[in-house]
Image (tube, rainbow, N blue to C red):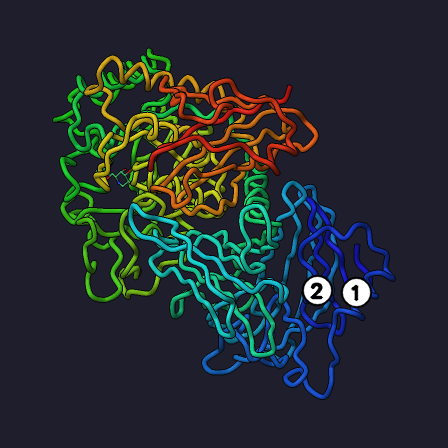
Amino acid sequence: MIDGSAAHLRAGGTSLVIALGDRRLPRILHWGEDLGALSTDDLGGIVRTALPAVGDSPVTYPQPVPVLPQLAEGWLGRPGITGDSDGRRWASRFLVVEHRVDEEADGPALRVLARDDAYGLDLALELQVLRASGLVRQRAELVNRGVEPFRVGGVELSLPVPHEAAELLDLTGRWSLERVPQRHSFHVGEWVRASRGGKPGLEHTMLLAAGAPGFGFRSGRVWATHLAWSGNQVLVAERTPADTRHLVAGESLLPGEVVLERDASYRTPWQYGSWGDGLDELAARFHRHLRAARPLGPRPVVLNTWEAVYFRHDLATLTALAERGAEVGVERFVVDDGWFTGRRDDTTSLGDWEVDAEVWPDGLQPLVERVRELGMDFGLWFEPEMVSRDSALARAHPDWLFDAGHGPGLPSRHQHVLDLAHPDAYAHVLDRMSTLIAALHVDYVKWDHNRYLLDAGHTPGGRPGMRRQTQQVYRLMSELRERHPWLEIESCASGGGRIDLGVLEFADRVWPSDCNDPHERLEIQRWTGLLVPPERQGTHLGAAESHTTHRVHPLDYRAEKAIWGHLGIEVDLLAAGAGELARIGGWIAFHKAHRELLHHGVVVHADLVEPAARLEGVVAEDSREALFALSLVERPRTWPLGRVGLPGLDDDMVYEVRVVAPGGEAHITATQPPWIADGVRLPGRVLRTVGLESPRLDADRSMLFHAVAV
Ligand code: DGJ
């Protein structure tokens, strides 16, 4: 609802109360818990009680920060907008002209038009609370109504958090060790997490959270922001000396990347905000949002050829691999890197998207036919934005490579980047991919991206092309999906280098990491899960000795960590013995039997005192069933571990809890606590509060518990 001075957007368990008075840009007074229906008087009351004194100056009497803070309004913090017209029009002062609330199908939206008459700039703001999830999102559109071109430096939007939010959490990482959490106090200043390589990157924080000190997965009020954008960006937690705290997000623009001629506009990506009592609730909002935005059918079990054969492709080997896959229950066969002309290692041929005639004299068709006979889907790897200098494409069209004025720049993994804003380059890639997808009826594209954009200048001239590149990638994905409506896409960028709600509008899943070591995967999947639900995370069973860390793990631990997401196999099935194949088949069958639960349920984590222990699970939406894994990542300091509570169950339902061992190795011995052998029947409230005595486990081992309401 809306009255003269405030609006109340309410959906999905979230309330957003926004002050609109004095023609100032919207100021969020409350973001969080649903406040129930509020009358006009209530809203007026909130405005009167939430706003501080105005005093003689907004600098000495700081006011709540608007969603786009401006210097000219007395804001000395990080500017919401920067830009100029050759040194003029650099200190905008937008005043609201009109606003309204629309009840959209996906949630109420406040639309505000503001104008800076002196500068001839318009600003349209859109704030929405989404019905399915209770997520908040906002974006801005800047229009130049003046004659002089307006050069946009940046437009960053802001979501305030209360003083209670005194601790920050964000993520960092590197190749094969993505999404490592870091926490610290929310001090005065700006905590800035920037991505500058043309994609969010392996080290990207994905989201930036601020919460009550010590917030965990199950408790502690916490708020977070995320930018739905796959290019350069910045996420900032800022606390001013006057103790304004807010979470900022925006696209980072390169010099001259957006120059608005008269009546031209620049629109920001959506800034998303989630909140919860604990990270599980915060993450569940993102999961619900993605599930509502594009529901997916059952996720077919994948066999990806990469770690089994790398570049060693031939029809006999891949056919045999597909046959083995079908025997153990695989449903989708994905041919990774190495199938196209000249690609025998990673030094050449990116861009030459023709099936290699030497390796595949009859093309990929015979393999695809066999895959189909076996009842499986077919997937193919591409790296559409990349080009090797040693390729027919680069030799024929050197001007299609990005160049900021010093040539194509440093190679990285021996490769460079194709400028997809070049119309012929775009048309070439679209045509090659589309032709192959149609001819082979490719069901699934694994879309890789292994080089950061260091020198993304258009030729000739070198003007920056980072932003256009991201837009063109979205356009390419969307055109391919339109032409081939059955197509699914995986966003893979050396592992987790491009994971965001922008790409997830077109991609069905992400590849969180090239690391299949279950020890690392437990953490990578846990933290990627703050944004991405399990069914959209590729989780693969790798070799006993991890190809990235060289740790060795038994099959059951590797398989257990793979069943939680979109399950895949990368272990070389041709080298596996009959016993191993049978156990892999057992895990796949278990995953299939439970994927409805795993892929639609609510993800939960326990906050355990013992630093070596992890308990994660998925609880069905109706709470009638759940699966939990208790793992040890190293030898625990507490021994025995003691009782662990099972989170997320319905307090008032009675559950039968049993240990399940899909690989057949039950760990059930006389030295385990008595309930492990026969299970137990207890109310959800008891399971949550009193908990169950933990089994004895070694480091890098786990046990699965299945809970069913009786
Ligand atoms: C990097 C990806 O993350 C891997 O899974 C694999 O597809 C290789 N690229 C292929 O070159």
Quarter, ligand 1: top left
Category of crowding for the residue at label 2, using alpha-carbon neighbours closer than 10 angstroms: few (below 14), some (14–19), many (at least 20): many
In screen coordinates, is 62 left or right of 616? right
Instruction: Point out the image quarter for the N terminus.
Output: bottom right
Q: Amino acid at mark 1?
A: Ile
Does residue 690 lie above or below 393 as drawn?
Answer: above
Q: Position of residue 429 (x, y in %)?
A: 31, 41
Query: Could one spot residue 169 in this view of the protein?
Result: yes
Helix, strand, or loop for circle 2? strand
- The reply to whether callout 2 and callout 1 are in contact (CB within 8 Å) is yes
Q: Which residue is mark 2?
A: 29
Query: Could one spot residue 264 in this view of the protein?
Result: no
Does residue 24 lie above or below 709 as drawn?
Answer: below
Q: Earlier in the sequence, mark 2 or mark 1?
A: 2
> Could you say which is closer to the camera, residue 206 or residue 117?
206
Q: Position of residue 288 (x, y in %)?
A: 59, 39
Q: Amino acid at mark 2?
A: Leu
The residue most toward the bottom is 56
Q: How many marks?
A: 2
Q: Which mark is residue 235?
A: none
User: Residue, x 66% and y 32% (percent of image)?
Assistant: 650
User: Residue, x 17% and y 17% (percent of image)?
Assistant: 316
Q: Position of residue 342 (x, y in %)?
A: 14, 35
How far apart are the two marked residues, 2 and 1, measured between alpha carbons? 8 Å
Helix, strand, or loop for circle 1? helix
Q: Which residue is mark 1?
A: 46
